[in-house]
Image: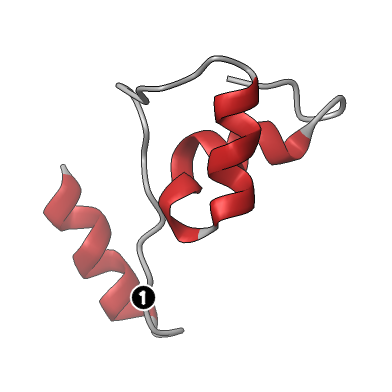
Amino acid sequence: TGHQLKDPDATVAYHAAESDPKLAEKLHQRGIEQREFKNGPIVVPNDFEQIMDVIRSLG
């Protein structure tokens, strides 16, 4: 999706464009309209058990 050293925002934009219009525009400029393989961010409290619960729920 993007080379981390060349353009780290490209990877963030691919996975979280709906969170920031500037990120969505970055993708649009590159011709990316669909993000079939996106993995959006999941907000979890800084609590080990809650983090593990989310990880388990994804598997």
Residue 49, quarter of the rendered image: bottom left
Of helix, strand and loop, which one carries label 1? loop
Residue designated by label 1: 44
Residue 36 versus residue 24 in the image, above or below: above
Position of residue 42 measured from the top left corner of the image (x, y, whole percent): 35, 62
| Residue 20 left/right relative to 33 | right
The quarter of the image holding the N terminus is top right
Q: Residue at x 60, y 45 (%)?
A: 23
Q: How many labels does the image show?
A: 1
Q: Which residue is drawn at 39% across and 84% down?
A: 45
What amino acid is labelled 1 in the image?
Val
Front position in the image: 37 or 27: 27
Position of residue 12 measured from the top left corner of the image (x, y, whole percent): 59, 43
The quarter of the image holding the C terminus is top left
Front position in the image: 50 or 4: 4
| Residue 21 left/right relative to 51 | right
| Residue 8 left/right relative to 36 | right
Residue at far top of view: 31
| Residue 39 left/right relative to 50 | right
Q: Residue at x 46, y 40 (%)?
A: 15
Residue at far right of view: 6
Residue 28, quarter of the rendered image: top right
Binning the other alpha carbons within 10 Å of mark 1 as few (below 14), some (14 to 19) or many (20 upward) gives: few
